[in-house]
Amino acid sequence: MNLKKINEQLEPKLVGTYNPSRRYGVMGICLGADLHSRLQKYVKQRNLKMSQIIKLLVKSYLDEMEEINVDR
Protein backbone atom coordinates (compact mmCIF):
# COMPACT_ATOMS: atom_id res chain seq x y z
CA MET A 1 0.00 0.00 0.00
CA ASN A 2 1.45 3.41 -0.95
CA LEU A 3 0.77 5.35 2.25
CA LYS A 4 2.39 8.55 1.00
CA LYS A 5 0.06 8.63 -2.01
CA ILE A 6 -2.97 7.94 0.19
CA ASN A 7 -1.99 10.62 2.71
CA GLU A 8 -1.63 13.20 -0.07
CA GLN A 9 -5.27 12.57 -1.03
CA LEU A 10 -6.67 13.01 2.48
CA GLU A 11 -8.43 16.27 3.33
CA PRO A 12 -8.75 17.68 6.87
CA LYS A 13 -12.07 17.48 8.69
CA LEU A 14 -14.21 20.62 8.85
CA VAL A 15 -14.43 21.91 12.41
CA GLY A 16 -17.81 22.56 13.96
CA THR A 17 -19.90 20.55 11.50
CA TYR A 18 -22.64 18.17 12.68
CA ASN A 19 -21.37 14.60 12.66
CA PRO A 20 -24.09 11.91 13.06
CA SER A 21 -21.52 9.10 12.86
CA ARG A 22 -20.01 10.30 16.16
CA ARG A 23 -23.42 10.01 17.77
CA TYR A 24 -24.60 6.75 16.17
CA GLY A 25 -21.35 4.94 15.37
CA VAL A 26 -22.17 4.79 11.66
CA MET A 27 -19.99 6.10 8.87
CA GLY A 28 -21.37 6.93 5.45
CA ILE A 29 -18.90 6.82 2.60
CA CYS A 30 -19.56 8.42 -0.76
CA LEU A 31 -17.42 6.42 -3.16
CA GLY A 32 -18.72 7.98 -6.34
CA ALA A 33 -20.36 6.04 -9.16
CA ASP A 34 -17.22 4.52 -10.71
CA LEU A 35 -15.56 3.34 -7.51
CA HIS A 36 -18.84 2.04 -6.08
CA SER A 37 -19.52 0.12 -9.28
CA ARG A 38 -16.03 -1.39 -9.28
CA LEU A 39 -16.28 -2.42 -5.64
CA GLN A 40 -19.78 -3.81 -6.11
CA LYS A 41 -18.65 -5.90 -9.10
CA TYR A 42 -15.62 -7.17 -7.16
CA VAL A 43 -17.60 -8.28 -4.10
CA LYS A 44 -20.30 -9.97 -6.19
CA GLN A 45 -17.68 -11.98 -8.08
CA ARG A 46 -16.08 -13.14 -4.83
CA ASN A 47 -19.17 -13.38 -2.61
CA LEU A 48 -17.83 -10.79 -0.12
CA LYS A 49 -19.24 -7.78 1.69
CA MET A 50 -18.22 -4.23 0.75
CA SER A 51 -18.03 -3.24 4.42
CA GLN A 52 -15.66 -6.13 5.11
CA ILE A 53 -13.20 -4.92 2.46
CA ILE A 54 -13.41 -1.30 3.59
CA LYS A 55 -12.89 -2.31 7.22
CA LEU A 56 -9.80 -4.39 6.35
CA LEU A 57 -8.36 -1.58 4.21
CA VAL A 58 -8.81 0.92 7.05
CA LYS A 59 -7.25 -1.50 9.53
CA SER A 60 -4.26 -2.14 7.23
CA TYR A 61 -3.79 1.59 6.70
CA LEU A 62 -3.87 2.33 10.43
CA ASP A 63 -1.57 -0.59 11.27
CA GLU A 64 1.01 0.65 8.76
CA MET A 65 0.70 4.28 9.85
CA GLU A 66 1.06 3.36 13.53
CA GLU A 67 4.14 1.30 12.68
CA ILE A 68 5.68 4.25 10.82
CA ASN A 69 4.88 6.64 13.68
CA VAL A 70 6.47 4.32 16.23
CA ASP A 71 9.70 4.34 14.22
CA ARG A 72 9.95 8.17 14.35
Image (cartoon, rainbow, N blue to C red):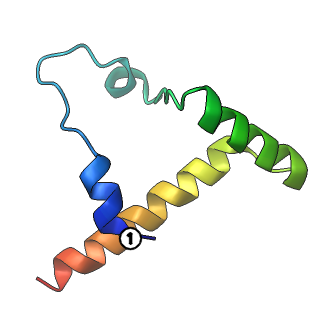
Residue 35, image quadrant: top right
Query: Considering only vertical position in the picture, is 24 above or below 57?
Result: above
In the image as oriented, which residue stretches furthest toward the front? Answer: 34
Measured as percent of width and height from the top left, residue 5 is found at: 33, 61
Residue at left offset 63%, top offset 43%: 51
Residue 3, image quadrant: bottom left
Give left or right: position of 60 versus 20.
right
The secondary structure type at the circle numbered 1 is: helix
The answer to which of 8 and 51 lies nearer the viewer is 8
Q: Which residue is mark 1?
A: 63
Residue at left offset 55%, top offset 27%: 32
In the image as oriented, which residue stretches furthest toward the top? Answer: 18
Give left or right: position of 44 versus 24.
right
The answer to which of 45 and 59 lies nearer the viewer is 45
The answer to which of 37 and 44 lies nearer the viewer is 37
Of the residues shown, which amino acid type is indicated by label 1? Asp
Residue at left offset 35%, top offset 57%: 6
Q: Quadrant of the C terminus?
A: bottom left
Query: Considering only vertical position in the picture, is 35 above or below 57?
Result: above
Residue at left offset 40%, top offset 63%: 61
Measured as percent of width and height from the top left, residue 63 is found at: 38, 70
Measured as percent of width and height from the top left, residue 1 is found at: 46, 71
Counting the numbered discs, the total is: 1
Q: Residues within 10 Å of mark 1 (few under 14, many from 20)?
A: few
The answer to which of 52 and 5 lies nearer the viewer is 5
Query: Considering only vertical position in the picture, is 12 above or below 46?
Result: above
